[in-house]
Amino acid sequence: MTLSAPPHGTAPAPQRARPAPWLGPLLLRLHFYAGILVGPFILVAALSGAGYALTPALEQAVYDEKLHAPVSGPALPLADQIAAAETVVGDDGALVAVRPAPEPGDTTRVMFTAEGLLDGQTRAIFVDPATAEVRGDLAVYGTSGALPLRTAIDQFHRSLGLGEVGRAYSELAASWLGVVTLVGLALWVQRWRTARRRRDLVRPDRKARGYRRIFFWHASTGVWLALGALFLSATGITWSQFGGANVSDLRSTLGWQTPTLDTALDGSTAGGGEHAGHHGSAQGSSADLDPATFDEVLAVAQTVNVNTGLVEIRPPADAASAWTVTEIKRSFPTQVDSVAVDGTTLQVTDRTDFADYSLPAKLARWGIDTHMGSMFGLPNQLLLAAAAFGIAAMVVFGYLMWWKRRPTRGFGKPVQAGALARAPWWGVLAVLAVGAVVGLFLPLLGLSLVAFVLADALFAATRTRTG
């Protein structure tokens, strides 16, 4: 069978136009606006986070006299060291905890309540364990034992020093860091599939100039930082005010909570989660404690599951509660076992062992300690600082790209609006479903995303009327 040509003068059948792409432009527009509007929050969080990561090593130098003492003999009983600290404090505070010197050359921390402290802070008296000489008097914070320098950076990093109100900033930063990173990765993959010189997307092209030079730095740096940025975003959300509460609820529903030590002698329970040591509140105690009981309770705990020098001994909050001895070694290998002891009979009433934690609980513990720089010590702290400085550089690169391509007038030149309107029905449905899930789980992110969409729609409508 032969094919005949169409009759003379007959136009060929029109070809169907390919639908305009919608997902790429939608992601690019989201990446653009998020980078411009949320960039300052991410920049502040990254730089303050880098400072926090570097302060543990800096503290050792700044507070050397208080943290360390010459090795001059065996350690005195804790009772003697507590007595020396109480002569300094007098009636100005209640004794809430003791941290024996973990190694020869370290000081013991005897910790009291005090007026004017942050939630989670105590007043620590630093005592030479061999001579009972008082070597310092400072406010310390949380299980990490952060001293004033690190505490100040931590408060700025977490809330800009504004308390609960300021925590909205860090939640926005942590949430949007994850979104911007995931969207940026999707755009990077899209560019990788069509690029002629793919190597420029994994290392910057030094010969490029102007906008292209900044773009290659942004793209190549971002892909190497992506995993670290996603980790910092995910673990940072667990501290957040609204999203963090949902994370806790989800873990509770799935049975992934951290085991809780039963400190009540009547059978009820008390305790805290992974974050209790980072910003938990100080526990009160009675004024008629026998300091010798600290030595006795510690000796009992060391026969059970306490086998590290980094421990904290807490007296009971009331007569119906037990003493607790808790390991606070957060570097690898993690040692956070704890034991509750009846101060009257010196009988063990409960214990928790890190080895018995579920895998999700262990991963949560390791993730938080890695985020804080406790895990793996100085190498991890340097890596965290490098990642944070890299994230800050990404924000700066983004603003430089916007500045290079800015119009003479107006806000900037994002990709054309209307991408979602061009999407098929299933695409619109998928976007709405993802947005709903994100908004329910991370409400602050969801609200800001809705605000972005409405502002963008208003901006597009205004340009259409004036165009």
Image (cartoon, rainbow, N blue to C red):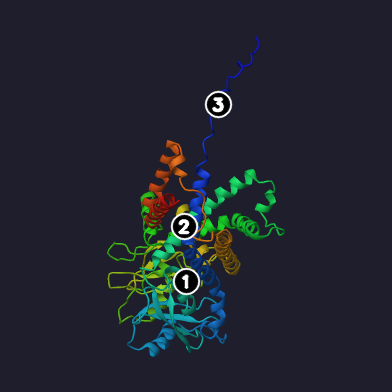
Disc 3 residue type? Pro
Give the residue at the far front of this rendering.
Answer: 9
Circle nearer the viewer, 3 or 1: 3
In depth, the one of 155 and 422 nearer the eye is 422
Q: Quadrant of the N terminus?
A: top right
Q: What residue is shown with label 1?
A: 144
Image coords of residue 444 (percent x, y) = 38, 58
- What distance separates the C-alpha of mark 3 from that of mark 2? 45 Å
Counting the numbered discs, the total is 3
Q: What residue is shown with label 2?
A: 176
- What distance separates the C-alpha of mark 2 from that of mark 1? 27 Å
The tag earlier along the polypeptide, 3 or 1, is 3
Image coords of residue 372 (percent x, y) = 50, 66
Callout 1: helix, strand or loop? loop
The tag earlier along the polypeptide, 3 or 2, is 3
Circle nearer the viewer, 2 or 1: 2
- With 49 as the anchor, is 267 left or right in this view? left
For label 1, the crowd category at 10 Å Cα-Cα, with few meaning under 14, some 14 to 19 and many 20 or more, is some
Marks 3 & 1, CB-CB < 8 Å contact? no
The residue sitting at 42% across, 41% down in the picture is 428
Q: Is residue 69 visible?
A: yes
Q: What residue is shown with label 3?
A: 14
Disc 2 residue type? Trp
Callout 2: helix, strand or loop? helix
Image coords of residue 374 (percent x, y) = 52, 67
